[in-house]
Amino acid sequence: MMMMLTYRLIIAIVFILFLYILTKIFKYIRYQYQMYLQLKQIPGPNSSIFFDKDFHKIFTSKHPFDDIYHLINRMSDEYGQDGLFCLLRIPLSYLIVTDFSIAQKLLNNDDFLNKSFEYRYFNHFILDNFNRRTLRQNKRQLLPYFRVQTLNNFLENSKKILKLLNENIDNCIDNNDGHYPDAGQITDSFIVDTIGENFFNTEFNTIRSGFKMTDWLEIVGEFIHTGINFTFHPLTYFQYYESLLFYSEKLSQLYQRFEIGIGQMITNRIEAIINDNEKEECKEQTANNNETMLDQMIRSRIIDGNITQMQEIRAQVNLIFLAGYDTTRTSLSWCLYLLGHHQSIQQRLYDEIQQFYDRLNSNDEEITISNMKQLKYLDCCIYETLRLYNPASLIGRSTCRSIQLSNGWHIPKGVNIIFLFRRINRDPKYFQQPEIFNPERFLMNNDDDRKEITIDRKRLAFFPFSSGIRSCIGKEYAMMQMRLFLINIIGRYKIQSLDQYGDAFQPLELFHPGAQFPIQFQRR
Ligand code: HEM
């Protein structure tokens, strides 16, 4: 009798569970279908990635992000004429934005605060849990580290690191046996070492050790690469499949190794600060503006000799690596690559840098954050690189509430929107011969040759650092790093790119640690 009852109970529980799962699946499909119906009402073409002839390839691809990205780009050629089209990518529906002015309106709208579904793995890593309050707190914490005063400290550190870099490149030239350091290695080491000193008061010493990174730092690039591919894998929509995927296993292994490295670095800083605090002369010391981000965070969280909120500190460190490392180094690599293939543009930039140095010497001045901005042609070269090869080739948002566009189109709440920066940045409506590297396109039309050259802001009709409330907070820092690096390299060396990649090398391959950009350096 008891046995019978137990069996019945088990069967009842299994049945209820089954019903529960079924209802969940049904609700999910109904929600997505209703969303699709609403999106379908938006005038303009509707496409479906599911029926595309190349869709099946993505399941077995080693680079699903690259494949989906190329597929969406191809679709946008077909459907993107209105600047916006609906894409059914079972089980989700998307709006794909391909026009600059529509993207600008949407991104600058406060309701575009939320990142889309695709960011979910990284959100865990940086504690960005889609919550307005947490997000604002996170940003408020980080913003002071990007103000002018801090940037001035950054500049001094970065100059010191550049000196080392020059010595290393000079050594390579002097011992020339036909091998030069790869552009990727140079930009990698420069960015990693400056991030270490500027944000974490930690010497990573990659330049000093002949451009070799420690194990866990190399993993940062691979982690980002794997994470992005995983994020875009079609099967990862169904969460239970995730653990079966190769990427999931790989991602968690990389994550653990990365976490160990980060954890060790933070522990070292905590120990150093606690030791400092114990010393008599440091007892009165409060958070100091010259301290790095990590040290300030640690100091403000030490209570009675113990550290609190460790998870938050880790998340902010992760965010700086995730957002600040690959972006700047790939942009700089592309810039060297492009300048190395366009000698006349490189010469014009060199002339501008020489005039700049002459001015500094005659006024007995040093390079500063503000005087670097006088080099307008340099900025044009950076913008043009970011336009052609923006490391953020697309970004995703989801709407916090329904939105009515000025042309009457209605976008419902909860829609995933992909902003296809790569296409927006190369729109022939805004850029003549968009595929060509032409920094001069941003200059003001100026008939009078004697006038100083100026950048026409209206011509910057693209999003190097995104736009609106969730745009890049490291923009000024990144610009400072890139200006300083290029003034130094182009001012000292004539460079020649030895390989031709162009669009074949897009979009994620550069993020891959194995990517190579051979460049020949010659002293000026
Ligand atoms: C050339 C260099 C860089 C480019 C092109 C770039 C571009 C971008 C873009 C497009 C976004 C928006 C991403 C999205 O919405 O999905 C972003 C966000 C962000 N960037 Fe950058 N970035 C660069 C360098 C940096 C650096 C050096 C740092 C910090 C050291 C940084 C910190 C951030 C942070 C914290 C966010 C997230 C903001 C948020 O979620 O609200 N970035 N960046």
Image (spheres, rainbow, N blue to C red):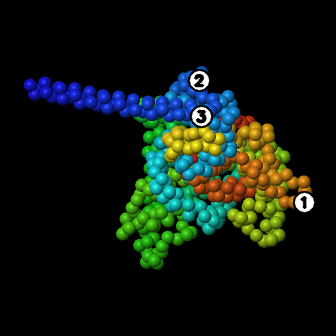
Residue 437 screen position, x and y as percent? 77, 42
Q: Is residue 121 above or below residue 61?
A: below
Q: Are marks 2 and 1 in contact (CB under 8 Å)?
A: no
* Position of the N terminus by quadrant: top left
Q: Which mark is residue 52?
A: 2
CA gap, disc 1 and disc 3: 51 Å
| First reached walking from the N terminus: tag 1 or tag 3 | 3
Residue 7 screen position, x and y as percent? 17, 26
SS at circle 3: loop
Q: Marks 1 and 3: which is nearer the front? A: 3
Q: Residue sitting at 23 percent across and 30 percent down? A: 13
CA gap, disc 3 and disc 2: 21 Å
Q: Which mark is residue 450?
A: 1
Residue 513 visible within the image: no
Q: Are marks 3 and 2 in contact (CB under 8 Å)?
A: no
Q: Residue sitting at 73 percent across and 49 percent down? A: 460
Residue 218 screen position, x and y as percent? 55, 45
Between 282 and 352, which is closer to the camera in this rendering?
A: 352
> Can you identify the residue that label 3 sits on?
42
Most extreme residue toward the front, as rendered? 408
Q: Marks 2 and 1: which is nearer the front? A: 2
**Residue neighbourhood size for the residue with mark 1, other residues' Cα within 10 Å, grouped as few (<14), some (14–19), many (≥20):** few
SS at circle 2: loop
| First reached walking from the N terminus: tag 2 or tag 1 | 2
Residue 373 visible within the image: yes
**Residue neighbourhood size for the residue with mark 3, other residues' Cα within 10 Å, grouped as few (<14), some (14–19), many (≥20):** some
